[in-house]
Image (tube, rainbow, N blue to C red):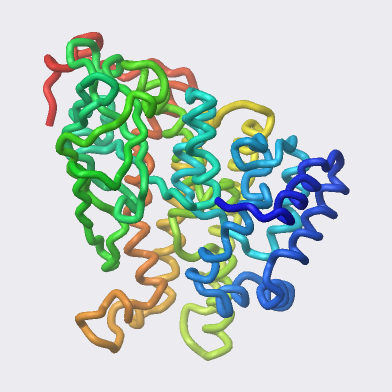
Amino acid sequence: MTERKGDQTMKADLADCRTTDQARAAARDWLTRRVPGAWRTAAESGGRSAVRRIRTPDEYRAWYPEFARSGLVVPRWPLDYGGLGWPGELARAAEAELRPYHLPRLNPLGLNLTAPALFAHGTHEQRLRFLPALVSNEEVWCQLFSEPGAGSDLASLATSAVRDGEVWRITGQKVWTTWAHLADFGVLLARTDPDVPKREGITYFLLDMHQPGVDVRPLRHLGGEAEFNEVFLDGAEVPDAQRVGEAGAGWTVARATLSGERQMVSGAGSGGVDRIGGTGAGRLIRLAEDRSAQGLPHGWDDTATRHALVRLWCEEQIRSWTNARVRAGVAAGFPPGPESSIGKLHGSELNQRLQETAARMLGLGATAWTGDPAGYAEEMPPEVGAMLRSRANTIEGGTSEVNKNILAERVLGLPKEADPWEGRPWREVPRG
């Protein structure tokens, strides 16, 4: 990431802020100087929807390094790693100034999955090498955890890593890897010792995706998109310098990533990208009002529809407050723990109810539409696409069943589910 002299001066001014008033003023000054005027005008006059109408995703990606150079993408991170070294109250004050201008953080898997593991278990050299380029979106990340025979029981994974001098050679298969086709690096779990219990023989690596031995193949889902992939690894190499934590301690490192993932997919107010996607209750209410204005059924003047939407809106508020409690713990210096499963579990199931409600409101328009059959995904009403996409919400980021177990055991303190193979070497445990 190339920095200009003016960028360095402005970042230094931001880093020197000591009060919330100074942080707010500095953020406003940066907005005025660095965010294109047309984007600011659209945000101030019409909100996020107006910004989306005049700003393409490609334009935002091209401008994004400007955001990263400011340190405002991750203001609580140390300066050396791309942040400003601010305490939580300054970061929240600045974020309140930025929020109306719709400046989403790119590289969400890097920010929410890779970074927590590096902060908790990585070396200073690893953080210096990877975090700044992650913040600027110059190096995009994916997560190489799930396998065809190791999804809900992730610790049973079979991908192997064999040490050869100063490198590790990786062989195996990963699946359901979000955005692997776009990624430069992936966080990878691989088995380095098959002769110990399954959680003790796993090591955590940072894998370069652009090398021989890495084959990425798309998996197209119901909505016609291909955001998931399967990844085949055939002798791909990872330098030992890109091993995070001790060999065999990867399960402990992975828990930082998994907690970050659950928080990221918890939905509104989670502090990460809203990967669960689709339509929120507020937008559904506006859709209902529009339908009533046009004399269409299932609008705001329909009592059953109105009651259903208000219930969903109330649930969204509860979800937002729950996620705020998790964020407050992170701001106080605690890593996102099993409590993040609460937001993930509720958020994924709530999003499915939201998207099903949106599709039902369309009536027959949700079952048939005009357009080229070959391009059905492009012609499909967005409410239908979001409803189809939402079916994955209770699977991705840890299934609802797994998250219920986490809550039962690690939050409520209930006895662990019996495992007849507990303590046995991985190679003796049945798989598949």
Q: Where is residue 405, by image quadrant? A: top left
Residue nearer the viewer, 94 or 307 = 94
Residue nearer the viewer, 78 or 353 = 78
- Vertical placement of residue 147 versus 365, above or below: above
Query: Which residue is drawn at the image coordinates 47% and 78% (left, top)?
Result: 298
Residue nearer the viewer, 328 or 201 = 201
- Vertical placement of residue 163 versus 319, above or below: above
Give the mark count: 0
Q: Is residue 52 left or right of residue 370?
A: right
Task: Please indicate, yes or no, whether residue 125 appears anywhere in the rendered image.
Answer: yes
Task: Please indicate, yes or no, whether residue 300 appears anywhere in the rendered image.
Answer: no
Q: Is residue 138 left or right of residue 169?
A: right
Which quadrant is home to the C terminus? top left
Residue nearer the viewer, 29 or 363 = 29
Q: Report x, y in % for residue 7.
A: 70, 54
Query: Which residue is drawn at the image coordinates 38% and 77% (left, top)?
Result: 381
Q: Report x, y in % for residue 180.
A: 31, 50
Query: Which residue is drawn at the image coordinates 48% and 38% (left, top)?
Result: 130
- Vertical placement of residue 108 versus 380, above or below: above
Q: Is residue 152 left or right of residue 26?
A: left
Query: Which residue is drawn at the image coordinates 55% and 73% (left, top)?
Result: 303
Q: Report x, y in % for residue 90.
A: 78, 42
Residue reaching furthest to the front = 5
Q: Report x, y in % for residue 419.
A: 24, 16
